[in-house]
Image: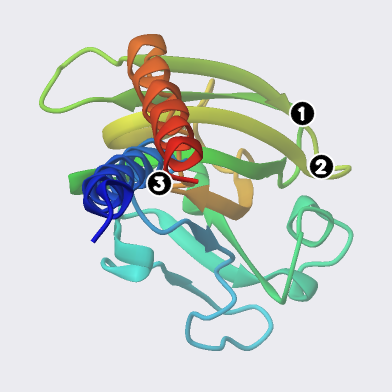
Amino acid sequence: MSRFATTAKPARAAARHVLGASALALALFAPAGQAVAALVTFDDLPALANGQYARVSDGYAGLKWSEHFSYVKASGIPDSGYARGNVSGDYVAYAAQGQPIGISRDSGFDLNSGYFTSAWITQQVTALGYVGDAADPAYSMTFTLNNTGPLLIEFNWQDLARVTFAQTSPGLGTQFVIDNLVIDEPRQSVPEPGSLALVIGGLALAGALSRRRA
């Protein structure tokens, strides 16, 4: 057996080792999500007749829903923010009796976005996001709604325990509509510069070993 043949095997093994480690590192640094994204449309809730409404039940979309978080058939209330705020399907959620509403999950969640419409009047709604057991919100946003069409709100709030939505002046006539909430959209993971350099260096070494073997 030649000397070249005896040294080629260790070189090939080293190259395979470096390539394997580099591939693993690249996989670890690839974009990844913390959970499967959920598009919450409210259209897969139990069917309702025109004029009927019901509370969104706890556990729907893996969340807890507050007492006044209800849903209704949008087309059953024409010429209103219910119908105009309908983004998909037949149903929309809304703040029943014009009361504040909220969602929560003990294990935490991200709130990415949603479409909001006032049912009747132009009004302001304030959203507050709470992390863990904190009494003070980590996130806050106030936006103005009218009944002419939905407004897309981009939250991109992370690691929430609960979120509340409240009108400036709660009460009858201040209902607002929500459709197509996006929850737990996958996050993009960016590698640290030093880690990325290590991966690139490993790939370069693997290429050099392969050329030397050839």
SS type, badge 1? loop
Dot 3 or dot 1: first in sequence order is 3
Q: Which residue is mark 3?
A: 33
Task: State the image coordinates of residue 59 (x, y, percent, origin top left).
Answer: 27, 68
Task: State the image coordinates of residue 177 (x, y, percent, origin top left).
Answer: 64, 50
Give the vertical position of 181 relative to 209 (above or below): below
Q: Amino acid at mark 2?
A: Asn
Give the vertical position of 190 relative to 186 (above or below): above
* Disc 1 packing (10 Å; few <14; some 14–19; many ≥20): some
Q: Which residue is mark 1?
A: 122
Q: CA distance from mark 2 to mark 1?
A: 7 Å
Q: Is residue 98 left or right of residue 164?
A: right
Q: Say which of 12 and 174 sits in front.
A: 12
Residues under numbered marks 2 and 1 in contact, where contact means CB atoms less than 8 Å apart: yes
Asked if residue 100 shows in the view, the reply is no
Q: Amino acid at mark 3?
A: Gly
